[in-house]
Image (cartoon, rainbow, N blue to C red):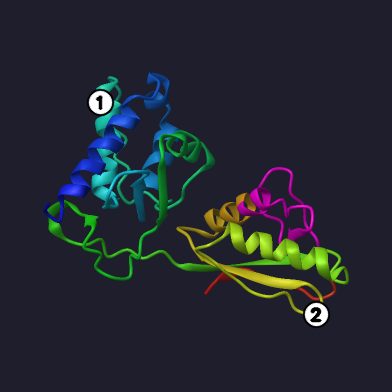
């Protein structure tokens, strides 16, 4: 079997699965933009199928426009519009039940599995961000340590530091923007059930979250 055959088969499977979605899905520009984000800078595989699928920004944008055209909608021309590599909960809810799983693409090297228009690699690499968090009640060692361990397990592609003596620590991860990094961490906190034991040092623009300041200030920003 040729090197690109699994890629083509997976691309056909991805196209078929997305075409099966309700027509309203293809009409929703916000959701289709999120699909573009999810298909870029990531490696996708489907349970029980060989190989991984990774698309260039242009190929992912073309696929989104192809899906919209099949339902009679105008193209969005999303290539290089920002947010590449971010997987929203809505997209996970669509592709996850169909057996699709993904992990970040190593955009710092020439990945032979990466499908790129014209045969050239994308020269884009996501920046690394540091999100500062505060562990509540650091004196309650057992519960507090479990919260950090649960968060670390929910972020397998990130580096989660150990809290210092006042409970401050950082999560280091790659994301297209700091806002995207905040949402990834927030989703992981909720999935790990740690959102009641760990809070952000700075107030993110995420609904139903809050700001907590311990005795020592912390900062979050790109590294």
**Earlier-in-chain disc, 2 versus 1:** 1
For the stretch drawn in magenta, what is the main secondary structure? loop
Task: Using the image as rendered, state which of residue 195 and residue 148 is in the foreground.
Answer: 148
In which quarter of the view is residue 26 placed?
top left
Query: How many residues crowd around disc 2 within 10 Å: few (fewer than 14), some, or many (20 or more)?
Result: few
Position of 172 compared to 219: left or right?
Answer: left
Q: Residue at x 23, y 58 (%)?
A: 113
Range of the magenta residues?
188-212
**Magenta stretch contains residue 197:** yes
Q: Nearer the viewer, mark 2 or mark 1?
A: 2
Q: Residue at x 29, y 20 (%)?
A: 71
Above or below — where is 160 with respect to 113?
below
Query: How many residues crowd around disc 1 within 10 Å: few (fewer than 14), some, or many (20 or more)?
Result: some
Q: Residue at x 19, y 44 (%)?
A: 8
- Residue position for label 1: 69
Q: CA distance from mark 2 to mark 1?
A: 56 Å
Give the total of numbered labels.
Answer: 2
Q: Secondary structure at mark 1?
A: helix
Above or below — where is 67 with respect to 6?
above
Find residue 168 and report its horizontal and vertical position in percent. 74, 72
Disc number placed over residue 165 in the picture, else none: 2
Find residue 182 and report its horizontal and vertical position in percent. 60, 56
């Amino acid at each position: 079997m040729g090197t690109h055959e699994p890629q083509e088969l997976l691309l056909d499977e991805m196209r078929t699965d997305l075409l099966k979605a309700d027509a309203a899905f293809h009409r929703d520009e916000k959701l289709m933009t999120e699909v573009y984000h999810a298909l870029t800078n990531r490696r996708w595989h489907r349970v029980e199928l060989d190989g991984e699928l990774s698309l260039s920004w242009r190929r992912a944008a073309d696929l989104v426009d192809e899906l919209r055209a099949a339902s009679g909608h105008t193209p969005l021309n999303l290539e290089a519009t920002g947010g590449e590599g971010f997987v929203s909960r809505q997209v996970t809810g669509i592709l996850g039940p169909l057996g699709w799983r993904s992990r970040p693409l190593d955009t710092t090297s020439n990945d032979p599995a990466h499908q790129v228009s014209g045969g050239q690699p994308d020269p884009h690499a996501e920046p690394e961000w540091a999100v500062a968090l505060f562990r509540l009640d650091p004196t309650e060692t057992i519960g507090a340590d479990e919260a950090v361990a649960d968060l670390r397990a929910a972020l397998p592609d990130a580096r989660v530091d150990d809290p210092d003596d006042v409970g401050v620590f950082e999560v280091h991860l790659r994301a297209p923007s700091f806002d995207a990094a905040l949402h990834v961490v927030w989703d992981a906190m909720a999935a790990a059930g740690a959102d009641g034991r760990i809070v952000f040092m700075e107030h993110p623009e995420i609904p139903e979250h809050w700001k907590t300041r311990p005795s020592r200030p912390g900062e979050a920003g790109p590294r």
